[in-house]
Image (cartoon, grey):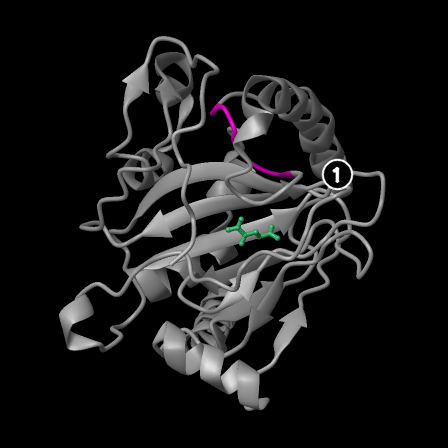
Amino acid sequence: MSKEESVNIDRASQYARQVLETSLCVIPGVIDSATIDRWYASFLPLLNRHIEREGHRLNRGPNRYYVTLPFVEPFAAPEIFENNLILSVVENLVGKDGVMCQLATDTPLKGSDYQEIHRDTQLLFPETGKETPPYQLAVNFPLVDMTLENGPFEVALATHMLSKEEGLRRIETGEAKLEPVLLKRGDVMVRDVRHLHRGTPNHTDTPRPMVVIGYSRRWLFRPEVNIEIPRATWEKLSERARFWLRFNPIVEEVKEGEEKYQSFAY
Ligand SMILES: O=C(O)CCC(=O)C(=O)O
């Protein structure tokens, strides 16, 4: 093993430990600015068409939209979803045989509001009232710097292993605190989506998209999401990428349509 590989393994396990303890880690400066700019420019027309088509739904709150990204250029980007460090952190948490099942964005615009404090998934075994090791992760990165003005994602650290009621109680009493995560363009956050969190209002005129790549244990079925992979793209993927994407449908062409993932909060 090269020195670089073993440094990466150490870093990945440190980041993974941080996620286990606090529910998230931030890996700074992973994605270069030119890539982020390309994504932002390609995303805006998608967002505008989404708002025109189904902006009336308000399912994420006013002026806040969840938009799936098509698995085509520039979004079918192995340098991001197959990034060695990110994927090693993910493997530490959901296993080397995990899956990638979601590629989308959350975007508050001016006029957005505080969301209800929520988690993104239920307990695996609700009747036990007990949490388990991690099974569903979000790898997030913003397409603009996330500032206090443009609707930063807020999270109460270390609430991922608590019931929602207990997490809310701790927030209420001040034992836990909702705090903004101020990511720079290029930073990547890996998070256990069970932590209590919320979107906050964007007070600027610039949309604040944050990309979400969903990774899960191999056995977790999330019917609300998938990634349609054009056959031509599939042919060009590495073995490792094909493995992580193996349960997604292969299609002849990706068609833009209504968003499937409508509800979000538990
Ligand atoms: O601010 C964000 O991007 C997160 C929004 C969110 O948690 C959601 O819509 O479920």
Magenta highlight on residue 65: yes
Q: Which residue: 51% across, 60% down?
A: 190
Dominant SS of magenta comes to: strand
| Image vertical order of residue 30 relative to residue 253, above or below | below
Q: Which residue: 82% across, 56% down?
A: 149
Q: Which residue: 47% across, 67% down?
A: 12
The stretch of residues the image draws in magenta is: 64-71
| Image vertical order of residue 15 relative to residue 88, above or below | below
Q: Is residue 204 visible?
A: yes
Q: Which residue: 25% across, 73% down?
A: 132
Give coordinates of residue 72: x percent, y percent.
51, 21
Q: Is residue 2 visible?
A: no
Quarter residue 93 falls in: bottom left
Front position in the image: 226 or 190: 226
| Image vertical order of residue 212 relative to residue 21, above or below | above
On the rendered structure, is 32 left or right of 87? right
Q: Residues within 10 Å of mark 1 (few under 14, many from 20)?
A: many
| Image vertical order of residue 113 relative to residue 208, above or below | below
On the rendered structure, is 142 left or right of 110? left
Q: Quadrant of the N terminus?
A: bottom left
Q: Secondary structure at mark 1?
A: loop
Front position in the image: 55 or 231: 55
Give coordinates of residue 156: x percent, y percent.
55, 75
